[in-house]
Amino acid sequence: MKKIQILGTGCPKCKKMAENAEAAAKEVGLEFQLEKVTDINDIVSFGVMSTPALVIDGEVKIAGKVPSADEIKKMLAE
């Protein structure tokens, strides 16, 4: 099971990233757990200074922009 985390304070971009990540994981038939990390101290602990950010299995994949569902699918396959 993949652990997908969305780092962000709940802004519209953060919500869009969560939607895209969930759609991508479902499209590839992946078992996943989606977690939204909104505490600023937790976000900084990942080394992220720009939100939203996408973390897959503990690894920051992208920060500061919202990738498309297709881009996220590629990240999930890595």
Image (spheres, rainbow, N blue to C red):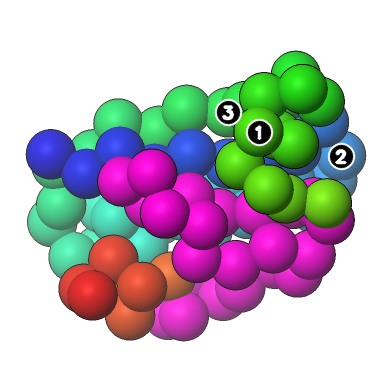
Residue count near mark 1 (Cα–Cα under 10 Å), binned few <14, some 14–19, many ≥20: few
User: Answer yes or no: do the residues labelled 3 and 2 have beta carbons within 8 Å?
Assistant: no
Is 19 left or right of 53, judged from the image as shown? left
Q: Which structural element holds mark 3? A: strand
For marks 3 and 2, the one nearer the N-term is 2
Please say whether residue 65 is one of the residues in the magenta stretch.
Answer: yes
Circle 1: residue type: Ser
Using the rendered image of the protein, determine whether residue 7 is visible from the camera's viewpoint.
yes
Residue at x-position 30% and y-position 38%: 3
Q: Is residue 77 above or below residue 33?
A: below
Residue at x-position 75% and y-position 69%: 65
Using the rendered image of the protein, determine whether residue 15 is visible from the camera's viewpoint.
no
For marks 1 and 2, the one nearer the N-term is 2
Task: Residue 14: name its quadrant.
Answer: top right
Q: Which residue is mark 2?
A: 11
Residue count near mark 3 (Cα–Cα under 10 Å), binned few <14, some 14–19, many ≥20: some
In the image shown, does 44 or 15 lie closer to the viewer?
Answer: 44
User: Answer yes or no: do the residues labelled 1 and 2 have beta carbons within 8 Å?
Assistant: no
What is the number of the mark on residue 31? Answer: none
Task: Residue 43: name its quadrant.
Answer: top right
Q: Which structural element holds mark 2? A: loop
Q: Which residue is mark 1?
A: 45
In percent of width and height, residue 6 lies at: 58, 41
Q: Is residue 6 above or below residue 69?
A: above
Q: Which residue is mark 3?
A: 36
> What segment is highlighted magenta in the picture?
50-71
